[in-house]
Image: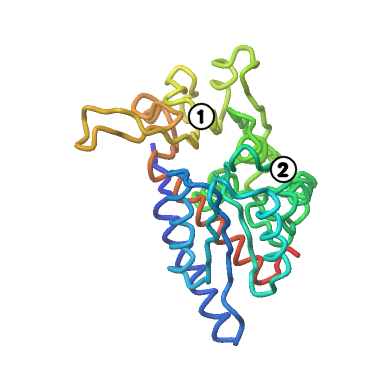
C-alpha cells in the first residue's frame, strides 16, 4: 500500500506556480490577481478564505478579500461582482459558499464573468467541462485528477465508482473520470442514497472516490483488494487519543481499509491540500488567458 501524499504534491505545485509568476514578472507582465468575496462570519469559511489569500501571496499573486456582514443585501453583492468583472487588474473571482439564505447562490454564481470564474462553478464552465471543451475545473475534482496524474495511476478501462453526486465533487469528478483523456477513460458508476447493493458496487471498484460526507462510511468489506481509494471527506471527530480532544477523519475508515489498497489518500494530507492549489492553478491560467 502506498500513501498518496497531497502535501508533497501541493509543495511541488507551489514551486511550479511561483516559478511561472517569476517568469511573468521578468517579462514585464502583471502578477496574477484573485479576488475573494465573503459574506457573513462563518468560522470555517473565514479560515478557508484566509488560507486562500495567504497561499496566493506566498506564490507571488496579488489577492484581496472583500468581507461583507451577514446582513449585506443580494444587490450589494451583485454590484461588487459586476465591479470586479469590469476590473482588468483582477483575473479571478470567487464568492465563498455557503451564502446567507437571503442571497441566491445561483444568481451570484451566474453573475460572475465565466472568464474569471476560477471556482469553475458557472454553468458555462460546467457545461464546457461536460462537453470536453477547455474550462476552469472545480478545485477538488481538479486536485484529484492531479493526484492520479502525478502518481501515474492507470485509469483507462478501470472501473471507477464515485460515492456522492454533489455539484462540487461527485458529479464533476465522474465526468472527468469518464472523459477521453488521461487520467480518464474509466468506466464510471455514481452511487447515492437510492443506490441498491451499495456494498457490492463499491467492492467492484478498481478506483473508489468517496465524497459522501459521512465519517468512516466506507469499511474494509466495501473495498476490492488492490483498489485505489480517494477520500474527499473531512470531519472533526471527538477523540481520547489527542491532546486537543479531536481527530480529523475522512469518509473512509482508514485503519481497516488502507491495508487492502494499492494506493490511498490519508485524511488530513491527501485531497485537502490539493483544493487551494487547484484554485491557484486556475487563477494562473486566467492571468495567462490560457482558457479564454
Ligand atoms: N465552500 C466550500 N468549498 C468551496 C469552494 O471550492 N469554493 C467556494 N467559493 N466556496 C466553497
Q: Quadrant of the C terminus?
A: bottom right
Q: Which residue appears at 55% of the width and 33% of the height?
A: 209
Q: Nearer the viewer, mark 2 or mark 1?
A: 2
**Where is residue 145 shown, x and y percent of the image?**
58, 47
**Where is residue 200 shown, x and y percent of the image?**
57, 15
Mark 2: few, some, or many residues within 10 Å (few <14, many ≥20)? Answer: few
Relative to residue 170, is residue 228 drawn left or right? Answer: left
Q: CA distance from mark 2 to mark 1?
A: 22 Å
Sequence-wise, the earlier of marks 2 and 1 is: 2
Q: Secondary structure at mark 2?
A: helix
Q: Which residue appears at 64% of the width and 30% of the height?
A: 165
Q: Which residue is mark 1?
A: 213
Q: Which residue is mark 2?
A: 106
Can you tell which quarter of the image residue 82 is in?
bottom right
- Numbered circles on residues, count: 2
Relative to residue 110, is residue 238 drawn left or right? Answer: left
- Residue nearest the viewer, comparing 153 with 174: 174
- Residue nearest the viewer, comparing 42 with 178: 42
Q: Which mark is residue 93?
A: none
**Where is residue 75 shown, x and y percent of the image?**
70, 52
Relative to residue 4, is residue 139 drawn left or right? Answer: right
Q: Secondary structure at mark 1?
A: loop
Q: Is mark 2 within 8 Å of ligand 1?
A: no
**Where is residue 116 shown, x and y percent of the image?**
69, 61
- Residue nearest the viewer, comparing 88 with 255: 88
Q: Which residue appears at 47% of the width and 47% of the height?
A: 41
Amino acid at each position: 500500500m502506498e500513501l498518496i501524499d497531497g502535501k508533497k504534491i501541493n509543495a511541488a505545485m507551489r514551486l511550479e506556480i511561483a516559478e511561472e509568476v517569476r517568469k511573468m514578472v521578468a517579462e514585464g507582465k502583471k502578477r496574477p490577481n484573485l479576488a475573494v468575496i465573503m459574506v457573513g462570519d462563518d468560522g470555517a469559511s473565514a479560515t478557508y478564505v484566509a488560507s486562500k489569500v495567504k497561499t496566493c501571496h506566498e506564490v507571488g499573486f496579488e489577492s484581496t478579500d472583500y468581507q461583507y456582514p451577514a446582513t449585506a443585501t443580494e444587490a450589494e453583492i451583485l454590484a461588487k461582482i459586476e465591479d470586479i468583472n469590469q476590473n482588468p487588474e483582477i483575473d479571478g473571482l470567487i464568492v465563498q459558499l455557503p451564502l446567507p439564505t437571503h442571497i441566491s447562490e445561483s444568481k451570484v454564481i451566474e453573475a460572475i464573468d465565466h472568464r474569471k470564474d476560477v471556482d469553475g462553478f458557472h454553468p458555462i464552465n460546467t457545461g464546457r467541462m461536460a462537453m470536453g471543451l477547455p474550462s476552469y475545473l472545480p478545485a477538488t475534482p481538479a486536485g484529484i485528477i492531479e493526484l492520479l496524474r502525478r502518481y501515474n495511476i492507470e485509469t483507462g478501462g478501470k472501473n471507477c465508482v464515485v460515492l456522492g453526486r454533489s455539484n462540487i465533487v461527485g458529479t464533476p469528478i465522474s465526468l472527468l473520470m469518464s472523459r477521453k483523456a488521461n487520467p480518464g477513460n474509466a468506466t464510471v458508476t455514481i452511487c447515492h442514497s437510492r443506490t441498491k447493493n451499495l456494498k457490492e458496487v463499491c467492492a467492484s471498484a478498481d478506483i473508489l472516490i468517496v465524497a459522501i460526507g459521512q465519517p468512516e462510511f466506507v469499511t474494509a468489506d466495501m473495498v476490492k483488494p488492490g483498489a485505489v481509494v480517494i477520500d474527499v471527506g473531512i470531519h472533526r471527530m471527538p477523540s481520547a487519543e489527542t491532546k486537543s480532544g479531536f481527530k480529523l477523519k475522512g469518509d473512509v475508515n482508514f485503519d481497516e481499509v488502507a491495508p487492502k489498497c494499492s494506493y490511498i489518500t490519508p485524511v488530513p494530507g491527501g485531497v485537502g491540500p490539493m483544493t487551494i492549489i487547484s484554485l491557484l492553478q486556475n487563477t494562473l491560467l486566467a492571468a495567462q488567458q490560457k482558457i479564454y
